[in-house]
Amino acid sequence: MFRSIINRAMRFLAGLAVAFALCAPAGASHLVTGNGFGFAVVAPESGAATKFYPHPHSYLRPDSANPLSEGIETPNFIKTLAFGVPRRASTAQYVDDSHVIRVRRADGSGYFFMPFGFDRPALIVTSEAATAWRVEWNRPVQSQKVVSTAGAQLLRFDGIDEPLLLIPMGRIRKAPAGQPLAASSAWALIALEKASEAEPAIREFADWRAGLSPKELVRREIAQFEHWRAEPGVHFRNEKERHLWRQSETMLRIAQSREPNRADRHGNGLIVAALPDVYSTPWVRDMAWSTMALARMGHRPEARAALLAYFNAQPTGKMRSEVSGADYQISVVRYFGDGAEEPFFTQEGSTNIEYDDWGEALWVLGEYLRKYDDPALLKTPTYRGPLYESARDFIVKPLLANTEKYGGGLIVAADTSIWEERQKDKKHFAFSTAMAVVGLREFAAVAERARDESARRHALENATLLEKGFRAAFIRDGKLRGTLEPGVKNDIDGALLPIINFGVVRDPKVIRDTVDRMRLLKVASGGYRRVRGTYTDPKIFEYWYEQEEFLFVDLALAELDRRLGRTAAADAMLARIVDKAAADHNIIPEMYVAVPCQLFPGKIGDPTGALPMVGYGAGAYVLHLLKRERAHRGSDSHTGTFAPSPLELLEPLR
């Protein structure tokens, strides 16, 4: 997926003359903490917090003055916040695979975390060092006043609407001018929506703190996080796998918005595709993988909240004129933080249509109901009515309205699909039709639960027609193709792997041919890219993006290898990802560097792109281990190997 930021692209273009030179090795990834109300970022090399966002997404809402922009950016309060002597070497790590970050320096140690038990965007910082906290604000301070006898202060900044409340948690001492945080060794930084919330926030914080010391608060936060965790339903091969599972579980929780819905905001439950400070936006399909991972892990409330977010996000249906006039609920691309549909990818500066999103939303709904048998969910009021009726009338109906006859069956109309092709280059993608098949079959089971026999039959009939159309359009000369339209770019395509794993393609010869042709996507870093890129102009972002290794493809191939009995190859691919993550705070990135350049710097094999990656990173890893466990349960009890029969190969691993 294109995980670019415009300013990065601009820096890339400005330095194009040296773009072909190898860049310095990439440093360790920055660490993110969050509580569903905001994010904070810590740089391990400096031991400093470098970002504190008062919302759990990068962009608040659309910009009416520039409809094709990223939107109104979420403000950031700080440039740097640290304790101790400046420029002294530091290390930082997550404590017990949680969201609590510990920084160690020669002159002391400290903690950063955003507490889940406190329902505001609050950053807790506490230091055990003799030296004081120092801060450089991101914007000039407009006003500063004391708002309580305990020394709490309220700051206003130029260009930031939200005031910042500072509550000391330790002994107060005199601080230098311009350094209010030097007055105590521990603080709560709480973003407010308006100044009148200061007194209620102080009372709420006192209730949450319950008289505990900063050190006791850290211990309680970690204990409460452990209580939230679900019992792993897998057998780990080693401690690295276990730690990566736990940290991935943490990333999935951090990434989900807990901001309550209200008249001007409908983003509760949305899950961003990646965590800052790179890029943090809710994409429909990434969120589907995150939601599925949460559901299968056993985090029912979070999975349910994500499903409701799909059906409560608004306004949607912005692209009706481009989708055969059909109104729809699920965005055709992604969402702003307030839940409004963002129907475009700004790197290309135009609107996009991605029909696979609708099939993936139906997939998640069906799988959730199969696991949890939650009939009340179908009756829950949502933006467009009870959830079941909304799914039937504003997902299934528009999906079917955007199909075309082909080969005696149906295929989904031309779109930009999973890899966000440029809209001007839209094609008939195998992945979009495959996800329509998967989604409709899942919806048929949902309709049966709702006792809607007519809708169930209609969904199955159309799923059958789409399967027939799929075979005619995308399996030609015994080879599975990524698009109906011929072309080297999608002739072999990483998106074909999840299609097979979903069980849409069942011919063993076609499957093995697809796996064999994946060698055409092999890159120097050891894994696989998404497609054979065809851009020749290095000024174009995708020229570089499509040359890098994409971990979502790696994990999909490892899953398929395992189902084909190629367990050594599957294990090697997984072990490489696990080992790399273990060396980088158990963070799974979007990509590894395969072709070093200014836009994606570092050595070959270094993490790059958006990171920490959530749905296509943490979520994909969790789902892979759960599927490996399913395969293991079918193993021979004497050999411990999994060699699927032809029938097992054809069945999708749920």
Image: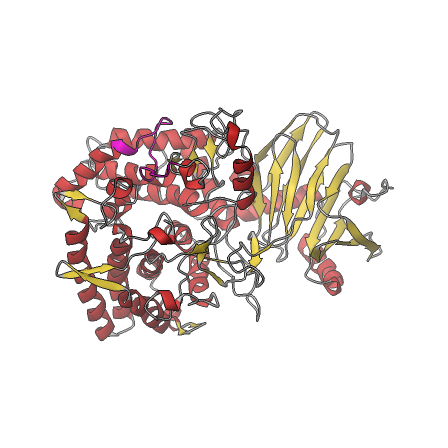
Q: Is residue 204 left or right of residue 507?
A: right
Position of residue 155 measured from the top left corner of the image (x, y, whole percent) = 77, 53
Q: Tell me how many marks there are.
A: 0
> Residue at coordinates 71% horizontally, 27% vertically from top-left?
87
At x 13%, y 58%, the residue is 407
Q: Is residue 627 above or below residue 21?
A: below
Q: Is residue 464 visible?
A: no
Q: How is the image coloured?
A: secondary structure
Q: Residue 478 in the image: x percent, y percent?
A: 12, 43
Residue 327 shown left or right of residue 161 in the figure = left
Residue 534 shown in magenta: yes
* Residue 646 position within the rendered picture, expressed as x and y whole percent measured from the top left: 12, 42
Decide which of 159, 371 is in the foreground and name it: 159
Residue extent of the magenta highlight: 519-536
Quadrant in which residue 99 is drawn: top right
The location of residue 465, given as percent across then percent down, is 17, 62
For the stretch drawn in magenta, the main secondary structure is loop
- What residue is at 35 percent from the left and 33 percent from the top? 574
Q: Is residue 644 left or right of residue 620?
A: left
**The stretch drawn in magenta includes residue 107:** no
Q: Nearer the viewer, residue 66 or 523?
A: 66
- Does any portion of residue 378 appear in the rendered image? yes
Image quadrant where residue 367 sits? bottom left
